[in-house]
Image (cartoon, rainbow, N blue to C red):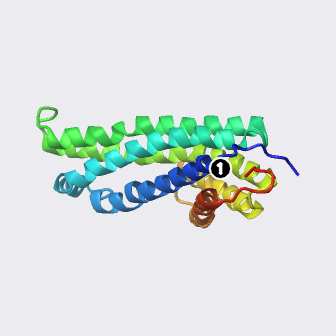
Amino acid sequence: MTTMNFPTSLRYTRLAGVLYLLIALLGFFSIGYAPTVLFVPGDAVANAQSILTHQGLFRITLFSDILIILIEMLLTVMLYNLFKEVNNTVARVALYARLAMSFIMAINLLNYFIPLHLLSDADYLKDIEQAQSLALLFLDAHQDGVLIWGIFFGIHLTALGYMVYQSGYVPKILGVLLLLGSFGYTIESVAAFTLPDNMLFSYLSMGLLGFAVIGELSFAIWLMTRKRNSLGLL
C-alpha cells in the first residue's frame, strides 16, 4: 500500500472538491444544455436564426466556458499537489494532459466568438448566406475541438484513476470508475475521427462515459466530505 503525504488542510481538499463539482455544473450547462437550445446542426439558416434569437444565452455560454477553463487550471495544480506523493511521474502526466486540455479549450472558444461576430456584425460579410454557412462551419469546428480536448482529458483521467486506485486511502472503487470513464472519452474522440459511423464504438463510449460521470461526481463529493484520519492525513 502506498503511503500518501497529502496536505493536511481539510479546506484544501474541500476546495478542490467544490471546484470539481463547479466544473461539472458549468459543463452540464455549456456542453449539455445550451447547445440543444442554441444550435440546429446541418441547417445554416435555422442555426443562424437560433443564435441571433438567443444571443444572451450564447454569451452566457461563452462566459461559462471561460470560467470552466480558469477553474480547470487551478484544479489541475491542486490535484497534482494532492497526488504527487503517490507517483510523481503519473501525477505529472495528469497535470500536463489536463493543462493541455485547458489550452485547447481556450483556443476552441474562437470557434464560438467568430460565428457571433459573423452573424451579428454586418461589417464582416455583406452576403448573409455566406455568413450563415461560415458560422455553421466554425460551430462544427468547435465540436471537433471538443473531441480533440477529450483525448487529453481521457489521458488525464487514466492517470488520475490510477493514482486514486493506488493511493491506499481514497476508495479504490472511485479509481476504477475514473479509469473506466477515461476509456469512454478516448474511444469517443478517436472513433469520431477514424470510425464516425460505427455505432458499436458510439454505444461503447456512451456507456463508459456514464462511469466517468458517476466517478467524477463521487470523487468530488468525497473530496468535499472526507475526514481527517488518525495520522492527520487524507
Q: Is residue 16 left or right of residue 70?
A: right
Q: What is the count of numbered marks?
A: 1
Classify 89 as above or below 166. above
Query: Which residue lies most toward the right here?
Result: 1
Measuring 61% from the left and 67% from the top, which residue is drawn there?
Answer: 207
In front: 183, or 229?
229
Query: Could you tell me residue 137's position as x and y percent?
Result: 32, 44
Q: Is residue 66 left or right of residue 132?
A: right
Classify 200 as above or below 24. below
Q: Quadrant of residue 67?
A: top left
Query: Could you tell me residue 165's position as x and y percent?
Result: 77, 55
Is residue 145 something that shows in the picture? no
Measuring 72% from the left and 44% from the top, which residue is drawn there?
Answer: 6
In front: 164, or 192?
164
Element type at marker 1?
Answer: helix
| Residue type of the residue flagged with mark 1 | Leu
Q: Is residue 35 left or right of residue 22?
A: left
Measuring 69% from the left and 35% from the top, which residue is drawn there?
Answer: 92
Query: Could you tell me residue 3's position as x and y percent?
Result: 84, 47
Q: Quadrant of residue 212?
A: bottom right
- Reading the image, the residue beneath label 1 is 157
Measuring 41% from the left and 60% from the top, which residue is drawn there?
Answer: 32
